[in-house]
Amino acid sequence: MVTTLDVERIEASIPAAEFFEKFVSKRKPVVLNGLPDDPSFKAQRWTEPLHAGKNHYGTDVQREFMPLRAFLDSLGADAGPHHYLTTQYSGGAWDALTVCSPPTDALRDDFPAVPRVMGRLCAQQVNLWLGRSGAGTSSGLHHDYHDNLYCLLRGRKRFVLFPPAAHAHLAPHGVVHAVHANGVIAYDPSARADGLDARTAAKARVRALEGRLGALGSRGKGKGKGKGKGRADTEERRGLLGALEDARRELAALAGEGGSDDEDEDEDEDEGGEALDDCGSLAGDLEDGVDDYDALMGGADDELDGDEGGAGPSGEDARGEEPPSFSRIPAALLHRHLGLPTTARLPEDTPADAFAGLAEATAYVVELRAGEMLYLPASWWHEVTSTSEPGAEEGPEVHMAFNYWFYPPGGGSFEEPYEDRVVWEYLREQNRAAREEASANGERKGKRGLEDAHDAGSKKAKR
């Protein structure tokens, strides 16, 4: 009998600093008894009854776009197969993801940008997962590139976990280049421990330093500046100019390694730099409607996370291949090895002695129920089996989850979890500005909708 380990359970009310010290900084998974206790977290309201052949998903499953109403209708039908909703993909352009993909963008008032318990971590994306399966469906064994706070709203989930160091025994599709000190697995030399690639970080550093120089120049135009203050400003300016020169040199070198880079950096601009242009691009020319933060953060990841499987339309990457972060071990074999109940089917061509290295890896098994959360550090391997629970009398059995992905901290403190301070201060500000703009746009759209409805009602009354 194979021995498996349990994951510690704690109360969701744990102070954020204590949570960081005991779990985030130690890269240790934990189950939290309860959902986020932020007043703005209202996702429990999403679990109302829904009126309306393969026991796996993620890889080798066709991806289909449809209106949300049509999806809910299909989910409510007795006859399967049933669709599975993921908001992970915001369209055909995999490098243009936003923090809130539809329909979560319309629900942003029902959840905090960062839950209290996660402290100062920076969110990469939020997602909604919704499906129906009485027998249980498997995601396949894989790992993600970001820290995951997984909030189960309805149904049951069984997680099989392995630490990042177990990759040598888990037969990944990719060739591991390195495992960073914080556990993040890299298949590309440019992938950093904080989840950014080197070029993305270099672009952010250039923009951050340009912004600081621009702010310093504006400050220098004020009246009443003394000689001492002037000398301090001159020294600060000299330091920023030197740092900016180094950052531009680094970016140019990285652009040379990766091909042409359409940075709109102007070597002839004044030495103070230009103020940041809200319509500019940190990732080259972008389609209208994608702002700097979307481009930078959404385009930072060559591989998309998939807590329930998949990196592209069929769980495959853009080349039609399995992503490097997925294991070749079939879910049925994993379940059989651990003595777990399964409805997954073992491929007929699987040799009896396949994946013998699995015996060298120690697994953790987590049974997660509605109203609980799992914190899973980046690059922890996991296979997720989802099972629905009976809904209301008039509704079907469904499982529903909401999760946050966060950029993984690289050894900093609770107050400053990311070591590259210049880059992350800039990204935080861009994150805040992007969210405020999105919220304002949503309010404007809502107001226009109410006005249109009022006008239509008035016209009808007149008729």
Image (cartoon, rainbow, N blue to C red):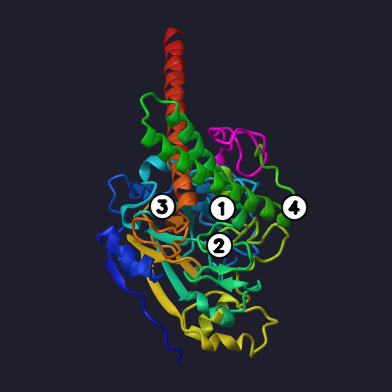
Counting from the top left corner in percent of width and height, residue 388 is at 43, 62
- Place of residue 461 in the rendered image (x, y in percent of width and height, measured from the top left): 42, 11
Measure the alpha-carbon separation of dots 2 and 1: 9 Å
In the rendered image, which residue does mark 1 sit on?
A: 201
Look at the numbered disc 4 and give the secondary structure of its residue: loop
Vertical arrangement, residue 280 with respect to residue 367, above or below: above
User: How far, Cα to Cα, is label 1 from label 4?
Assistant: 17 Å
Neighbor class of circle 1 (other Cα within 10 Å; few <14, some 14-19, many 20+) is: many
Return the disc, 2 or 4, that comes first in the chain's sequence. Answer: 2
* Chain-order first, disc 2 or disc 1: 2
Is 36 situated left or right of 400 in this image?
left
User: How much space separates mark 1 and mark 3, taking CA atoms?
Assistant: 47 Å
Residue at image point 48% right, 47% down: 427
Point out the stretch of residues depicted in magenta. 267-293
As drawn, the residue found furthest toward the top would be: 462
Residue at disc 3, secondary structure: loop
The quadrant in which residue 436 appears is top left
Q: Disc 2 to disc 4, how far (Cα)? A: 19 Å
Q: Are marks 2 and 1 in contact (CB under 8 Å)?
A: yes
Question: Sequence order check: which comes first, mark 1 or mark 4?
Answer: 1
Which is closer to the viewer, label 2 or label 3? 2
Which residue is at a point 47% across and 45% down the rendered structure image?
A: 426
Q: CA distance from mark 2 to mark 3?
A: 45 Å
What distance separates the C-alpha of mark 4 from that of mark 3? 54 Å
The residue carrying mark 3 is 395
Which amino acid is tagged 3? Gly
Mark identifier at residue 259: 4
* Amino acid on which the number 2 mark rests in the picture: Arg
Q: Is residue 301 left or right of residue 433?
A: right
